Image (cartoon, rainbow, N blue to C red):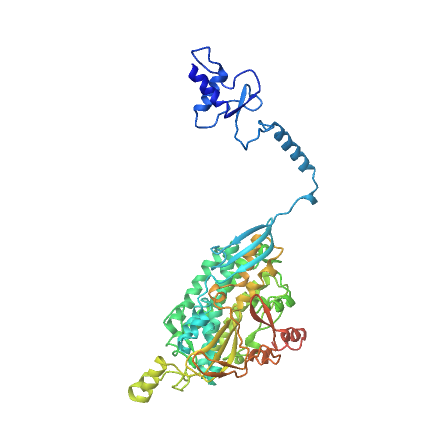
Amino acid sequence: MAALHRLAARSAKRLCLRPACTLPLRPTTSSNPSISSRAAASAAASFSTTGLRRYATPAETQGTVLIPVDETFSTPADPYRMKSLNSEENDIQTSADDSIHNRKVRHYTVNFGPQHPAAHGVLRLILELNGEEIVRADPHVGLLHRGTEKLCEYKTYLQALPYFDRLDYVSMMTNEQCFALAVEKLLNVEIPDRAKWIRTMFGEITRILNHLMSVLSHAMDVGALTPFLWGFEEREKLMEFYERVSGARLHAAYVRPGGVHQDIPVGLLDDIYQWATQFGDRIDETEEMLTDNRIWIDRLRGIGVVTAADALNLSFTGVMLRGSGVPWDIRKSSPYDAYDQVEFDVPVGVNGDCYDRYLCRMEEFRQSLRIIHQCLNKMPAGPVRVEDYKVSPPPRTAMKENMEALIHHFLLYTKGYAVPPGDTYSAIEAPKGEMGVYVVSDGSERPYRVHIRAPGFAHLGGFDAVCKGHLLADAVAVIGTMDLVFGMLSRPSFTPLFCRNANFSSRRGRQVERCGGIDCISKQNRYPAIQKNTAKLTYRFGVIHFVLWDVYQKWTDCDYFASA
């Protein structure tokens, strides 16, 4: 008994006893009545390795409350939080009386992607939301960056061609066509007429391939699954035409500098004609499901409105520009290949919203089909490559008979052909907009510099301006109407396109003279694209884009586009 009292006395140094009521906190059942309940509770607390438990609510607590103390501990004034509970009730009442103007608005930041199913690639958007309203959108690209421009500088001109198939992997042959036109300008060669018509026909087949993927995947994102499945049946037929003419379904490498790889196989033109006669009905079926659909109209009409002036300021091209009412088409303004010998119309929108851009793409189906029919009827006979064996390989029959032809073939595929020094810019009307390739040659077999202007890069750069004020669900509709492919968006090295001096030193040890290039310090720009379009250089979204001010001036003149 004396030992127990000494233990309780030592525990009093560690415990501050606060008397509350006369009844104990927990009833004790001791056989010896001489041990008080207070001493037993103190002894139990000293032997326990855990904190004391309270077996009653704060309002029902009776007895002594044990509070551990040390040198830096002060006794709380409200151990049962009775005052704090009353203050919380007062705070709730006070907050209910506050005016809405005194409340703090919180914007939420949401990551859209990079694995979102509606992104169709590695798109990452950092969206700042006020509820479900988009306040700001910050696109992040580069997750599919492969350094394509730098890789082209270490390949011959023929070896660099397959890289363009892998940029926009939905519009393969148009990518090849743009690079081939740039190299042909530097080589100063004229390809045969049959090669021009073949390029034009397969360029429109590629346009239909791209629009099938664009429109129908857009419909699937909004909620219409049936058009997507129906459209892939037609897309499979076009892939078969790709395979028959080039041997590959996607990465064709068919359009090459100097013409095309090989002639069209026997019977392919007849099969293309049979397909073209029935494809118009497939377009009508797709429009029956979508054009007058109430849900489709509600999701697209009035969403993503872009005015004509904003579209020009944001460097929009293609359907994104024509949907705002500007009839700008490079096939009309600067024809290439056989586009100056075919008849077609340029569809334009009125309101500049997602629904107008959808209608433009549906009409481009019919115009592309119209061009394909003309190519089938006007296809001339003759060679499909230039007959310069230093640029295009000689036929196999010539290699078996002529040693010089065999040597040309060997040097062409091992060393490559040399391109005269100079620089050029080639632009085409790709399915997604204006695709441009800027090539600088130092006179060797490899390009000194290759820069690729992706149309979707400018479109994604304007995503913040287009989506601001819309709901989060509308972002999916806007992304679908922009027709983004991130193999093309993530291609650049984000390095300046121009050199500051007229003469610059080549990495191969040669002095290269800039022929018609741009001196960034001088205002006398002689860029090839500027000679035709009188564009104004602006720095937006990290790269140099071309704002076609001359287009806007001519667009205001009704007589300019009367012939278009």
Q: Quadrant of residue 270?
A: bottom left
| Residue 99, x across and y down, in percent | 70, 41
Rendered view: 386 above or below 429: below
Q: How many marks?
A: 0
Query: What is the residue that sits farthest to the left in this orientation?
Result: 400
Is residue 315 visible to the viewer in this orientation of the structure?
no
In this rendering, does residue 443 appear at all? yes
Q: Indicate the position of residue 371 as horizontal and vertical percent values.
A: 51, 74
Q: Quadrant of residue 150?
A: bottom left
Of 250 and 228, nearer the camera is: 250
Q: Is residue 74 above or below residue 498?
A: above
Quadrant location, the N terminus: top left
Quadrant where the C terminus sits is bottom right
Asked whether, in this view, residue 259 is left or right of residue 96, the answer is left
457 or 401, which lies in front?
A: 457
* Residue 561 rendering spot, x and y as whole percentages: 63, 76
Residue 333 vs residue 439: left or right? right
Q: Residue furthest top?
A: 33
Q: Position of residue 64 (x, y in %)?
A: 54, 20
Name the residue at 29% across, 88% down: 401
Residue that appears at 44% across and 78% down:
507
- Would you place residue 110 above or below residue 440 in this image? above
User: Is 355 or 237 nearer to us in this picture?
Assistant: 355
